[in-house]
Image (cartoon, rainbow, N blue to C red):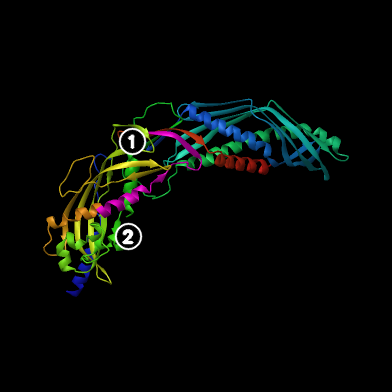
Amino acid sequence: MILFKQIIAFLFPLLVLSRIVFDKPSKWNNPPGWPAVKIRLTKFGAEHVKSVGVKILNEEIPKLSGFQTQHSFYEHGITGTVQLYDVNVLGYSPPEYTSIDLAPPSYVILQLDGMGITLAGRFSGMVALLPITGSVIGDIRRMTVRLKIHFRTAPDGLMQVKVNDCSTIVPYSHFSISADGILSGFVKTIEAMINEAIKKKIPSIFCNSLQNVIEDNSPRLFQYEGDPRSTPFNPPVMLTTNDSSRMIYFYGSEYLFNSLLFHAYEGDRMIVEIDESVLPKPYKSVVRTSCERNDVSVKNFLSSLCLGTLIPELAIRYPNMTSSFVLLPHQVPEFGLSRGVTSIDLKSLFRIFNVYFSGRILIYIDEGNRKKQILVTAADLQADLRLLVENEKFAAALKLNKFDVSFVINLKKQSMILRLHRSAVRGLNGDSIAQLAPLAKTFLGPQLAKALKKGVPFPLKDSVEFIDPQVIVHDRFIEVATDFRLGEKKLREKIKEAFSLNFSQLKG
């Protein structure tokens, strides 16, 4: 008998705290194949990216130094090696013409025409076991660089950016080598061969550097690192338009929100606990079972309220004790977007319809060395959630205006249905539990709102400034249309790093 009681004592909390395995709502999309996020860069936006990128290239390339390359040769029966080192940029001519074009389905073609670069450095080598030294100076003129960039979705669902092709045309290239000593005449005979090697290596610096900047950084912009478990539903189709009046368009499916809610639910990150420690000092009495009627410091109604006033049975059964509340979801909340909201400025609010939440409210009594569960109620919440987009972040505002013991259909209000699910206190019924509604409105609501208002920062916050962004709510997705200004500091760091690395480490 004692063993049986121990087993029951062990299983009972598990039964209370366990979640119900949910059935996927019928409106969740099951067929795969549609994206959760779509990004459309217009020609207007691409031109801005090109202008800023070329400007930084023109400023950073003249600062390059430390180029080195090594080349082996066999000439007139003589073998040897030559090395160019400490090669610096003496002069740079910006491209005479630049262009950027968008090609279907998802290609960007960048072309830079008419560039010139003058280099000078040191020369050393071995010819038939004899050392030689000297200097080198020369230039490349009217060079053309053309890149074809492909944006696609990788098998893992992340954005993939690849430079499919990078070609260069060098109409003119000449480098003169001045060697010291008796082998200077022989060095002149291999000058053409060295020129050809440099003619190939310098353009490859541009291709390799630009490829590094594009491929290594672009996919990270929208990579989500988190729960490795897959979401058991898929994004619905987004019927987007081809409007091109702004620089860039972002489209976000309601799948994003439902997926986040699903993983938060699965990871037990949606549990909200209210106890005396999280309440402001004037309101700590709310979780107490007995009210301090003679407290002269009480200055308002809420400060004089306590749980024992709302549910007298608790004051009788557990006098002068402290309680705590746990809001525990027992199924995944549902989130939906509906057409009908016009475009407005991002600093204001717009409505998000159809937010449903179902869970349990667990009430505990603090008995000193342990917390005793005394009450479990079912709570169904329907809220008019509003998306708050300001201070360069996406957040949500939840205002609980109305709680009823019956279901209320009102998109402008909120309603909570409270039902008695299990009680360890005799005399409690549904009418008694209805008194919890004001308490939930006052304290559970703000706690939920506080969690939602933390928000998510704009993508590319340290690289891009969004200008006059506009939002349109469509059926099942949100559209954000905006102009932007690239932050030169971050892009300059990436370009400088890539060119410096390729310029100094290129080997022959």
Disc 1 element: strand
Quadrant occupied by the N terminus? bottom left
List the residue tagged with mark 1. Answer: 477
- Observer able to see residue 61: yes
- Which residue in the rendered view is the most extreme toward the front? 296
The location of residue 100, given as percent across then percent down, is 54, 27
Q: Earlier in the sequence, mark 1 or mark 2?
A: 2
**Nearer to me, 213 or 93:** 93
Residue 262 sits above or below residue 298 on the image = above
- Observer able to see residue 20: no
List the residue tagged with mark 2. Answer: 278
Disc 2 element: helix
In the rendered structure, which segment of residues is drawn in magenta? 442-471
**Nearer to me, 257 or 229:** 257
- Does 70 sit left or right of 54 as displayed? right
Q: Residues within 10 Å of mark 2 (few under 14, many from 20)?
A: few
Name the residue rendered at 60%, 35% in the picture. 56
Callout 1–callout 2 Cβ contact below 8 Å: no
Depth check, mark 1 against mark 2: the one in front is: 2
Residue 311 sits above or below residue 248 on the image = below
Q: Residues within 10 Å of mark 1 (few under 14, many from 20)?
A: many
- Does 489 sit left or right of 270 as displayed? right
The location of residue 425, given as percent across then percent down, is 15, 64
Is residue 295 found inside the magenta-colored segment of the image? no
- Does 413 sit left or right of 388 as displayed? left
- The quarter holding residue 259 reads top left
Q: Amino acid at mark 1?
A: Phe
The location of residue 176, given as percent across then percent down, is 79, 33
